[in-house]
Structures are given as structure tokens and as C-alpha cells.
Amino acid sequence: MTARMTKRCAIGALIAALSLPPASADSLRVKFGVLRQTHSSETLSILDLPAEDDTLAGALVGAEDDNTTGRFTGQSFAAADAKLAPGEDAVAAATRLVDEGASLLIVDLPAEELLRVSDALKPRGALLFNVSAPDDSLREESCRANVIHVAPTRSMLADGLAQYLVWKQWRRWLLIKGSHPADERLAAAYRASAKKFGARIVDERVYVDTEGGRRSDSGSVQTQRLIPPLTQNAPAYDVLIAADESEVFGEYLPYRSFDPRPVAGSGGLRPASWDAAHEQWGATQLQNRFFRQFRRGMNARDHQAWIAARMIGEATTRIGSAEPTALRGFLTGPEFSIAAFKGVRLSVRPWNQQLRQPILLTDGRMTVSVSPQEGFLHQTTELDTLGVDKPETKCRLQ
């Protein structure tokens, strides 16, 4: 039996165990769905190839943790997987999950698809947990009352990095953005962060995607010939910021820019909600459990799915119900908080239903720092220095 087959069998066994947890006749049985996309294998580094159980693995560990508590509180939790094939309709898959009794959905979809599913399920009373889409618009002008956002926004990630760079007195930035719409949205977040915290973008340049193979065509054409001229003759700057959400060039920038400057953003020092190298505040315990079960590191989507599953378990335990409306009311209320191995307890912003959380700054090998940084103060919580604050929100929940 190959290693891949062994891993599939292990995942199948865990799903089966969580699908039929032991429960007494009068226990509360909670089934949540995991609606997830197939992520592209076109990554810059072979180390970043998405796993077959991406996102699902975190939800399964979360359900397992929920059941640890549930054995004492008369509750059981089960995860139902729905991985979309390319071109498969997300609304149809989400509807099937609800029909099968999963009115709580952990959702790993792009913004447009998430909104379609949210609107389609609104009459069904389902509650969605967004664990991947970073779009600020989902929490602002396009916010929906039936969506809790576990994934951080672009503005939260950009603010987390900006705070550290400003704390380091690296205030002059050279911004290089990709040529795709998502790259422009990320660049806009960095522009806003620079203005918010007193940094200055001294110049802005565009890396045009020629649509070559991201790994196979990455030699001298991609690196030694294109990047030095792109970064040459820039005004004096402290750090190079890459806005490359499409994963075309950002990882190529370190050690290849014309001037010897640190790289941050989509390459070099990266802001993230989670990283497989994170080990502070007891995170090693979670990382080790995850690795033992799935033989890989826990990525950000896995951790966000784990948090979503734990939010479901915590709220259900506290209110004694898994009814979506009651669950949403508790999660967005003042009594809810949850630990997530990030140094502080996390809570939900009631005005746009975004989970407050620290942002890790990582180089892929270790956690370099954690934002919010010392000295960035807020009248309510320092976590609200990251992203859109209540006075600025455009959200009108509906």
C-alpha cells in the first residue's frame, strides 16, 4: 500500500468515526458541512502544493476536539465533506449538505461563490463560516448576516505587516503588484495600511504575468532577467512590498532585487493567520497532533477550519443548541471568546461578523513577530487596530 493510499485510508477512517460518534438517545447531535474548492496546483514552490484534504483536515481535528468535550456534555459532532470538482455548482452542493442535515457550513470558496451560496441558503436558515476568502467587501458593502468570517481580511493582513515595518522604522516602501485583479485588491490594502500607520510608498511597479509555467519556466527568464530591471532605479526605499495574491512572482523577489533590501508581503516576510512553523502559546501541541494524523503541516485554511469547528462546538456547549440563529446570536455577542494558540482569546466583531485575531509574521521557517505590535493602541481592544474598525464600517447586515 502506498503512502498516499495509507493517508486516504486514515482520512476516511477519521471521517467515518466523526460521522457516527457515540451518543446516547437524548444527546444533541450536530452535523456540519465542509464545502471546499479544489485549489490550483500551480504554485511557485513545490512545497506549497495543496493537499487533497486541504481545509477538511482542520475541520476534522476541530470536530474531534469538540467531541472530547461533548462526551461530558451530552453532545456529538460530525463533519460531512463536500469537495467541489472543477466546474461543479457550489449552490447545489451546499443545498445537498443542508438537505442532509448540515445547516452549519464551513466554507472554503472564492468571494463570488460564497455570496451565491449565502444568498441561496438564506431562506433555509443555514449559517456559514468563511474560512478562506479574504475580501474586505464580504465584511463591508456585501456583508451577509448568515456568514461568520473566520479568515482574516486583506486589510487585517496588510495592517499586521505594516505595524511591524513601522515599528522597525522601515517606513519607505517600494510596492510591486501583479497584473491580476486580486493583486490590485491586495495592493490597495497595502496603500491603505501605509496611509493608516504613517509609511510611504515611494514607487509602485507592475509585474506582468506572461502565463508561463510557474515552476517549469522559472529559470533565468523569470528571475535573473526580469526581476533586476523591474526593481532598478527606484527611489530610496527600506523594504520591497510584493502584492502577488495570484502567486506569480512574489517568492522570486528575495535575493534577486537590484538593491539589497528585505522583501515582505507575498514573499519574504509574510503576514498570515497561521503557519506550520508556529509554536508559541502551546501551538506545538496542535501542530504535532495534526501532523500525526495527516503527515503534513497545518496551513492557514486548515487552522481557520479548525477554529470554525471549535466555534461551533464552543457555542453549542454554552447555549445547549445548534440552531443557526441562536448560534449566530451567541457567537456575535459579548460572552463568546475562544482560544486558538495565538496568545489571546478571539472574539467576533458584531458589526461585520469578522473574527478578531492576531496576525503572524512568518518567513516560512519560524514566526518572526505577531501583530498587533506594542504601542498600537485602541480604546476597545488592540486587535481592532487590524482591519476595518467599527466607525469605518460599511456593513449593514441583512
Image (cartoon, helix red, strand yellow):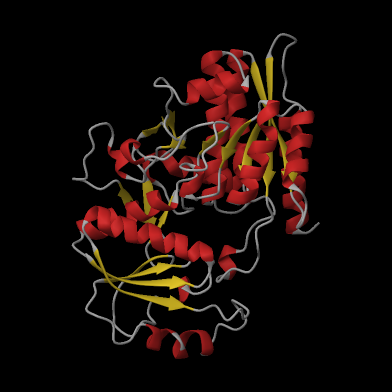
Q: Nearer the viewer, residue 77 or 174?
A: 174
Q: Which quadrant of the figure contains the C terminus?
A: top right
Viewer can see residue 368: no
Residue located at (50% from left, 50% from top): 134
**In the depicted structure, whether residue 91 falls above or below residue 102:** below
Residue located at (46% from left, 91% from top): 225
| Corner quadrant of residue 367 | bottom left
Residue located at (37% from left, 45% from top): 280
Viewer can see residue 252: yes
Where is residue 166? Give x, y as percent. Answer: 22, 58
Q: Nearer the viewer, residue 281 or 312?
A: 312
Residue located at (59% from left, 54% from top): 296
Where is residue 97? Give x, y as percent. Answer: 75, 34
| Corner quadrant of residue 200 | bottom left
Q: Residue at the far right: name it.
A: 1
Horizontally, residue 93 falls left or right of residue 368, namely right
| Corner quadrant of residue 34 | top right
Horizontally, residue 349 falls left or right of residue 300, namely left
**In the depicted structure, whether residue 154 falls above or below residue 41:** above
Horizontally, residue 361 falls left or right of residue 327, namely left
Where is residue 168? Give x, y as percent. Answer: 21, 60
Q: Which quadrant of the figure contains the N terminus?
A: bottom right
Where is residue 129? Give x, y as percent. Answer: 57, 37
